[in-house]
Structures are given as C-alpha cells and as structure tokens.
Amino acid sequence: MRSGIYLDTSAWFGVLSEREPRHGQLRGAYHELIGRGERLVTTNLVVAEMHGLLLRRLGRDVALDYLDTLSTEATHHVRFVDRQMATAAIDRWIRPFRDQRFSLCDAVSFELMRQEGIRTAFALDRHFATAGFGMVPADR
C-alpha cells in the first residue's frame, strides 16, 4: 500500500485564498507538508472542484495558474476516477452511510484513500473524520 496525504478542496482552497479565515494556518500546514516531502494525492474530481471555486471566487487568472502549477508539481499526484472507482465509492461509502451527506467527490476521496492506504487528509471537511480518517491541520 502506498501512503501520503490526501488533498481536499476544503483546506486546499484556503491555502490559495487570503479571504479564508484560516488562510495563514492552512498555508503554513500545506508548505510544511511539501517541505517534509509528503506524497500529496488527490483526484481529478477535486481538481475540477478547485478550478471551479477559484474561477468563481478569485478569477480566471488564478484558476488557470492553479492548473498550470499543478501540472508541474512533482509532489502532487492526481488520480483519475474511472467507472470502477466511482462504483466502489458509491457501494462502500454512499449506500452504507445514508445518514450522512457524503457527496460523490467525498466518497471517491474516501475510496481512493482506502485503496492507497492513505490515513490522513489535508481537509477541513468533517466528513473525513466521520469516515474514519485523520485530518491536518487539526481543529483549533
């Protein structure tokens, strides 16, 4: 099993947006992860979600810079979701957790983490904790 840290939109956006209340803490934690040489993993669903959020909140130039930077970052690994992964995510995370409001993006994130042995997410979304994963930065 491969490990690393999973990058979720909830915290990653805060790194890039100075308007976010925890921007300084998130930016510091993100750069600490990179400085330690952590393997940072996400999905193309999160990349699309991030791009859309950046586009709406910070503009076209920032959104394009994000995509350009992501494509050159050696520490960032983007996994593309196929039908098998989406089906596994639905069957393992959405059906059994009907009492939760897990999005398909959440469920795919959890399934990828499970498959790759990733135990921790760089996230603010409490759904990761609900699904049994650790989170950085820790709530303060």
Image: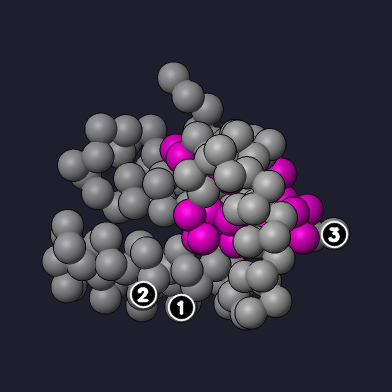
Q: Please give the residue where the numbered disc 3 appears in the rendered image.
A: 1
The three-letter amino acid code for the residue at tag 3 is: Met
- The secondary structure type at the circle numbered 2 is helix
- Residue 128 percent across, percent down from the top left: 57, 41
- Residue 126 percent across, percent down from the top left: 50, 35
Q: CA distance from mark 3 to mark 2?
A: 28 Å
Mark 1 neighbour class, 10 Å CA radius: few under 14, some 14 to 19, many 20 or more: few
**Quarter of the C terminus within the rendering:** top left
Q: Is residue 72 left or right of residue 41?
A: left
Q: Is residue 112 left or right of residue 35?
A: right
Q: CA distance from mark 3 to mark 1?
A: 24 Å
Magenta region includes residue 107: yes
Residue stretch in magenta = 103-125
Q: Please give the residue where the numbered disc 2 appears in the rendered image.
A: 67
The three-letter amino acid code for the residue at tag 2 is: Leu
Q: Can the viewer see residue 62?
A: no
- Residue 133 percent across, percent down from the top left: 66, 39
Q: CA distance from mark 2 to mark 1?
A: 6 Å
Position of residue 84 relative to residue 137, above or below, is below
Look at the image and name its color scheme: one colour
- Residue 76 percent across, percent down from the top left: 55, 65
- The secondary structure type at the circle numbered 1 is helix
Q: Are marks 2 and 1 in contact (CB under 8 Å)?
A: yes
- The secondary structure type at the circle numbered 3 is loop
- In the rendered image, the residue lying farthest to the top is 140
Closest to the observer, 87 or 74? 87
Of marks 3 and 1, which one's residue comes earlier in the chain? 3
The three-letter amino acid code for the residue at tag 1 is: Ser
Q: Residue at x 64, y 79 (%)?
A: 83
Q: Please give the residue where the numbered disc 1 appears in the rendered image.
A: 71
